[in-house]
Amino acid sequence: PYCATKWAMEGLTQSLAQELPPGMAAVPLNPGIINTAMLRSSFGGSATNYPSPREWAKIAAPFLLKINAADNGRQLTVPGS
C-alpha cells in the first residue's frame, strides 16, 4: 500500500498540473530519505545517516520557495535529502 499511495499522489498531481491555468504549478515532490520513526523501524541505527524532519525543512524551504510555473507537472526531489 505504501508504494501505491506514493504513485497515486504522483499521478493525481500530474493530472492536476494539466488542468491548472497558466502561471500555476502542481509538483509531485519527492522529499528524499528522512529520519522518521518508519525509517528507524527499517534501518535501525543507520537512520541517523539521514536528516531529521527539522533538518530536512531547513534544506527544503529555500528549494520549495523557488518552485514556479515552469516546474508544473515535473517530479522534483529536494536536493541533499
Image (cartoon, rainbow, N blue to C red):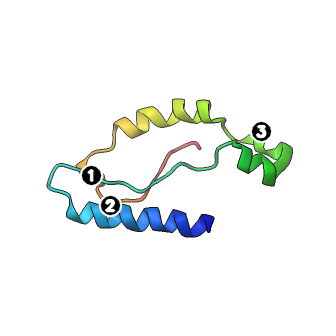
Contact between labelled residues 1 and 3, with CB atoms less than 8 Å apart: no
Dot 1: element? loop
| Amino acid type, mark 1 | Ala
Instruction: Mark 1: give few (<14), some (14-19) or many (20+) Cα within 10 Å.
Output: many
- Position of residue 77 measured from the top left corner of the image (x, y, whole percent): 49, 51
| Residue labelled with disc 3 | 48
Name which residue lies at 27% across and 45% down.
68
Name, please, the residue furthest toward the left: 22
| Amino acid type, mark 3 | Thr
- Which mark is first along the chain, 1 or 3? 1
| Residue 72 shown left or right of residue 39 in the figure | left
Measured Cα–Cα span from mark 3 to mark 2: 32 Å
| Residue 24 shown left or right of residue 55 in the figure | left
Name, please, the residue furthest toward the front: 1
Instruction: Mark 2: give few (<14), some (14-19) or many (20+) Cα within 10 Å.
Output: many
- Which quadrant holds the C terminus? top right
Name which residue lies at 66% across and 35% down.
52
| Amino acid type, mark 2 | Gly
| Residue labelled with disc 1 | 25
Dot 2: element? loop
Using the image, determine if residue 45 lies above or below residue 43. Answer: above
| Residue labelled with disc 2 | 73
- Position of residue 13 measured from the top left corner of the image (x, y, whole percent): 36, 61
Task: Name which quarter of the figure residue 9 lies in.
Answer: bottom left
Measured Cα–Cα span from mark 2 to mark 1: 7 Å
- Position of residue 47 measured from the top left corner of the image (x, y, whole percent): 77, 44
- Which mark is first along the chain, 2 or 3? 3
Measured Cα–Cα span from mark 3 to mark 1: 34 Å
Compare residues 41 and 61 and report the one nearer the observer. Answer: 41
Name which residue lies at 85% across and 43% down.
45
Contact between labelled residues 1 and 2, with CB atoms less than 8 Å apart: yes
| Residue 16 shown left or right of residue 21 in the figure | right
